[in-house]
Image (cartoon, rainbow, N blue to C red):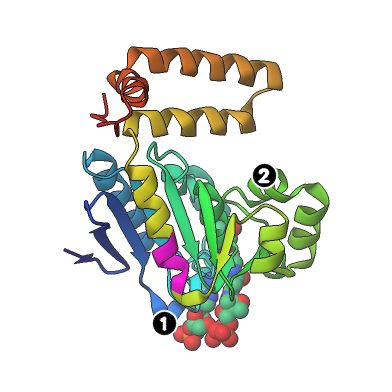
Amino acid sequence: MATEGQYVITDKKGEKQNVGFIQLNRRKALNALCDGLMKEVSDALDAFEKDKDVGCIVLTGGDKAFAAGADIKEMKDREFAEVYSGSFLSNWDRLARCKKPVIAAVNGYALGGGCEIAMMCDIIYAGENAQFGQPEITLGTIPGAGGTQRLCKAIGKSKAMELILTADRMTAQEAEKSGLVSKVFPIDQTVNEAIKTAEKIAGFSKITSAMCKEAVNAAYELSLQEGLHFEKRIFHATFATADRKEGMTAFSEKRKPTFTDN
Ligand SMILES: CC(C)(O)CC(=O)SCCNC(=O)CCNC(=O)[C@H](O)C(C)(C)COP(=O)(O)OP(=O)(O)OC[C@H]1O[C@@H](n2cnc3c(N)ncnc32)[C@H](O)[C@@H]1OP(=O)(O)O
């Protein structure tokens, strides 16, 4: 059953209720990411990470906006000493630290912090009206929740630099072409398609999907040699799991595997 917070709706979806669903629900402000909203997202992630049924999480917004960025009105009077000593925005990293796979289903604006939280997710599905951008330069600031780093890694330096220095936006189609987004859908199908994919992922072993995620994410941090070494270690570690044994045994016995997440 859906639970409605002040800024976020959470639910469990899919036939087996194994998809954690988080919808940003601050429509009038185009889902501007105020402190309260980000705290609710963080709490929802904590709950879904603890929930043994949940194998994948979908994060979405509304049809007009996934999120139009950090809440500018809340941010405008903050001073250096406050943001520095309070590590302003550091709690946003909760999304990037989630061990379970997260799919962003993006319709409409994904600007500034909206684009940055989409990039913290593992897969981005976009609706045909999606627009991605980092317009912080128009406000006299820079992307501060990973935009300068993750956008570069996702689409390369030249395109990232162009978006960040001009505040231009990228369409869903351009975002797909450049690899930021994995698929584009008609607006009314984006969320359902994300849930379908999330159900598929949640049907596999949760321990194996966490290992896949950790190994792929290492590609962002490590040199090729270090990454290959890390991957091999994780691959070897799958031999310590019951689900690896079950997966290979089921294949040999020509039956479907029953994973126990062990
Ligand atoms: C995280 C960091 C460090 O990287 C920093 C950031 O994220 S900074 C924020 C970056 N985002 C932006 O600069 C986008 C700001 N918004 C817009 O440019 C426009 O709202 C729009 C192009 C997304 C949509 O335009 P339009 O359809 O004309 O709608 P509006 O009337 O402008 O907006 C409706 C309503 O939402 C409020 N709103 C929109 N975005 C924000 C925001 N980021 N923070 C706070 N409030 C926002 C807007 O003020 C309107 O509300 P009212 O003023 O009418 O009550």
Q: Is residue 28 above or below residue 61?
A: below
In the rendered image, which quarter is residue 249 located in? Answer: top left
Quadrant of the rendering where the N terminus is positioned = bottom left
Badge 1 element: helix
Please state if 52 lies on the left or on the right of 173 as rendered: left
Q: Residue at x 47, y 31 (%)?
A: 212
* Furthest residue in direction front, as rendered: 254
Residue 41 image position (x, y, % from top left) = 35, 55
Q: CA distance from mark 2 to mark 1?
A: 30 Å
Q: Nearer the viewer, residue 258 or 212?
A: 258
Residue kind at label 2, given as amino acid type: Gln
* Furthest residue in direction right, as rendered: 158
Q: Nearer the viewer, residue 90 or 188?
A: 188
Residue kind at label 1, given as amino acid type: Lys
Q: Quadrant of ligand 1?
A: bottom right
Q: Nearer the viewer, residue 139 or 102?
A: 102
Q: Nearer the viewer, residue 163 or 250?
A: 250
> What residue is disc 2 on?
149
Marked residue nearer the N-terminal end (2 or 1):
1
How packed is label 1: few (under 14 Cα within 10 Å), some, or many (20 or more)? Answer: few
Q: Mark 1: is the Cβ under 8 angstroms from ligand 1?
A: yes
How packed is label 2: few (under 14 Cα within 10 Å), some, or many (20 or more)? Answer: some
Please state if 129 lies on the left or on the right of 259 as rendered: right
Badge 2 element: helix
Residue 51 image position (x, y, % from top left) = 21, 42
Which range is magenta? 189-193
> What residue is disc 1 on?
28
Q: Say if residue 31 shows up in the picture.
A: no
Q: Is residue 157 above or below residue 30?
A: above
Please state if 164 lies on the left or on the right of 186 as rendered: right
Q: Say if residue 62 shows up in the picture.
A: yes
In the rendered image, which quarter is residue 14 located in? Answer: bottom left
